[in-house]
Image (cartoon, rainbow, N blue to C red):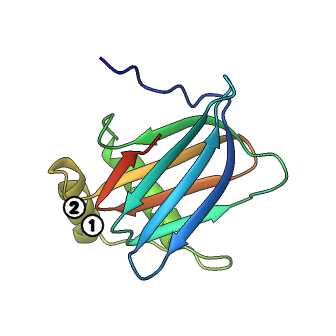
Amino acid sequence: MKQAKNFHDAEFIGLHFARDTQTLMLSFQLASGDLAVVRCEGVTHFRLGEMGLQNVLSRLLISSEREFPPDDIRKNINWACSRDGYEHAMTDARAAYFLSGIQHRRFSILVLEPSIGAELVVVCESVTHVE
């Protein structure tokens, strides 16, 4: 059985977004020194904030690997849909749509919780550990 990678204290070292395929590739250097790549396909929303010279993860949370409380789903997607100077607030119907989609695996949500630096939320069709 393949052991899950430990992203605690990993460094977020890069991303590549391909608009034509709506694919986002995220690159990490794990605390062990190994590299890890995560692919998000069918990206519908994403937001990256506070990226700097050092971007260390506290946790990498993926809905296909853990359960998200409904309030966390709403909070994270609201943040992903917001911009500087504009805070998005989804309706209850839209929140129910995302919650149902995530629970039935039509969507995935990926949340990068930082220790320092970058924070990231991605809403997409699927998340895959590439390497």
The residue positioned farthest toward the bottom in the image shown:
20
* Disc 1: which residue: 92
Q: Decide: is 95 above or below 131.
A: below
Mark 2–mark 1 CB contact (< 8 Å) = yes
Q: In which quarter of the image is the N terminus?
A: top left
Q: Residue at x 43, y 45 (%)?
A: 130
114 left or right of 53 in image = left
Amino acid type assigned to the residue bearing label 2 in the image: Ala
Task: Kindly state the secondary structure of the residue where label 1 is placed.
Answer: helix
- The CA span between labels 2 and 1 is 6 Å
Instruction: Look at 35% across and 21% down and name the residue there.
Output: 2
Q: Nearer the viewer, mark 2 or mark 1?
A: 2
For the residue labelled by badge 2, is the local secondary structure a helix, a strand or a loop? helix
Residue 69 against residue 94 in the figure, above or below: above
Left or right, 127 with respect to 60, comes to left
* Label 2: few (<14), some (14–19) or many (≥20) C-alpha neighbours in 10 Å: some
Query: Which of these two is toward me, 27 or 111?
Result: 27
Instruction: State the image coordinates of residue 90 (x, y, percent, origin top left).
Output: 37, 71
Instruction: Indicate the amino acid at tag 1.
Output: Asp
Q: Where is residue 29 in the image (x, y as percent from the top left)?
A: 67, 37
> Looking at this rendering, what residue extends furthest in the left direction?
104
The image position of residue 3, as x and y in percent, is 40, 19
Q: Residue 96 carries which label?
A: 2
- Categorize mark 1 by other alpha carbons within 10 Å: few (<14), some (14-19), many (20+): few
**Is residue 100 visible to the viewer in this orientation of the structure?**
yes
Task: Give the total of numbered labels.
Answer: 2
